């Protein structure tokens, strides 16, 4: 689905990421961990072609990103749902409009039953008409998951999705992502929360990628 071959990235100073090779196979579940500032968000941005590698190859759905036109990238991104740590919504529009925005942007009409099922799945069926500022942190993150999956993506990239949540809500969010994986979605979650990773490993065959000294390694059982 998404592959990095010998990828490097620099924002202009020294290299932040070097010689990164990884493969997110269809249906796989990966965590990405590493200290603050190690480059987790940067790697996620490379994975959906928000950033272009400064060296090496990033391949999304079998096509190298550097050769893609703007339209190709937009098309590829429709198959990738992204959950950001600091979720942004249009605060003057109700939750349901925010969640279905990706459909509206693509000129697709939402199927009311599908949208209702989706909001129920994330536990926000009673908040469809709420404005985003009235939602709690956990509700916002669950809404972000709903918005990320509304287009039926093949891949979900989540950047510290539980960063601001208490443990109970973190587990609830994790459960949603595990369920998506069971439906066949490819999942990558960036997190520094090792307890979350340990918990997930009891539910799903998750691999852990760790950024250390600019390189990405597959972590062993030593978490
Ligand atoms: N647009 C940018 N321009 C220059 N430097 C940047 C930019 N974005 C990030 N950086 C720097 O790159 C480094 C890695 O940032 P990144 O956000 O990828 O790390 P992270 O592992 O996700 O960190 P955290 O866990 O704190 O979110 C940091 O030192 C950051 O300051």
Image (cartoon, rainbow, N blue to C red):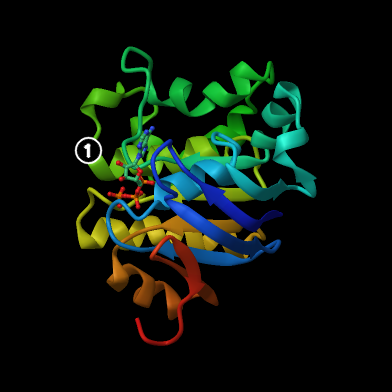
Please indicate whether residue 211 sits to the left or right of residue 165 in the image: right
Residue that protrudes farthest toward the top in the picture:
92
Residue that protrudes farthest toward the front in the picture:
14
Please indicate whether residue 46 sits to the left or right of residue 4 in the image: left
Q: Where is residue 169 in the image (x, y as percent from the top left)?
A: 27, 56
The residue lying at 68 percent from left, 27 percent from top is 74
Please indicate whether residue 155 sits to the left or right of residue 211 in the image: right
Q: Where is residue 196 in the image (x, y as percent from the top left)?
A: 33, 68
> Mark 1, residues whose alpha carbon is within 10 Å: few (<14), some, or many (≥20)?
few
Q: Where is residue 113 in the image (x, y as percent from the top left)?
A: 60, 34
- 128 relative to 65, above or below: above
Dot 1: element: loop
The mark total stands at 1
The residue lying at 52 percent from left, 39 percent from top is 148
59 vs 152, nearest the viewer: 59
Please indicate whether residue 159 sits to the left or right of residue 7 in the image: left
Residue indicated by mark 1: 136
Residue that protrudes farthest toward the bottom in the picture:
221
Q: Can residue 30 be seen in this view?
A: yes
Q: Quadrant of the C terminus?
A: bottom left
Q: Quadrant of residue 68?
A: top right
64 vs 173, nearest the viewer: 64
Q: Where is residue 132 in the image (x, y as percent from the top left)?
A: 30, 25
51 vs 184, nearest the viewer: 51
Q: Quadrant of the N terminus?
A: bottom right
The residue lying at 36 percent from left, 49 percent from top is 161
- Split into quadrants, the picture shows ligand 1 in the one at top left
Q: Can residue 185 be seen in this view?
A: no
For label 1, being within 8 Å of ligand 1 is answered no
Q: Quadrant of residue 189?
A: bottom left
């Amino acid at each position: 689905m998404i592959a990095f071959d010998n990828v490097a990235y620099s924002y202009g100073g020294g290299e932040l990421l070097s010689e990164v090779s990884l493969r997110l196979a269809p249906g796989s579940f990966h965590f990405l961990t590493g200290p603050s500032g190690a480059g987790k968000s940067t790697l996620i941005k490379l994975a959906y072609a928000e950033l272009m590698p400064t060296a090496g190859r990033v391949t999304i759905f079998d096509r190298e990103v550097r050769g893609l036109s703007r339209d190709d990238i937009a098309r590829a991104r429709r198959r990738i749902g992204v959950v950001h740590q600091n979720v942004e919504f249009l605060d003057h529009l109700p939750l349901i409009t925010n969640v279905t925005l990706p459909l509206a942007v693509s000129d697709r009409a939402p199927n009311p039953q599908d949208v209702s099922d989706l909001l129920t799945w994330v536990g926000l069926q009673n908040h469809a008409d709420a404005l985003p500022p009235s939602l709690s942190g956990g509700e916002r993150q669950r809404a972000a998951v709903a918005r990320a999956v509304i287009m039926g993506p093949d891949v979900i990239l989540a950047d510290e999705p539980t960063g601001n949540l208490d443990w109970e809500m973190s587990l609830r969010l994790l459960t949603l992502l595990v369920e998506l994986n069971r439906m066949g979605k490819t999942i990558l979650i960036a997190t520094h929360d090792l307890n979350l990773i340990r918990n997930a490993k009891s539910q799903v065959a998750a691999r852990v990628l760790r950024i250390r000294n600019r390189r990405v390694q597959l972590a062993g059982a030593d978490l």
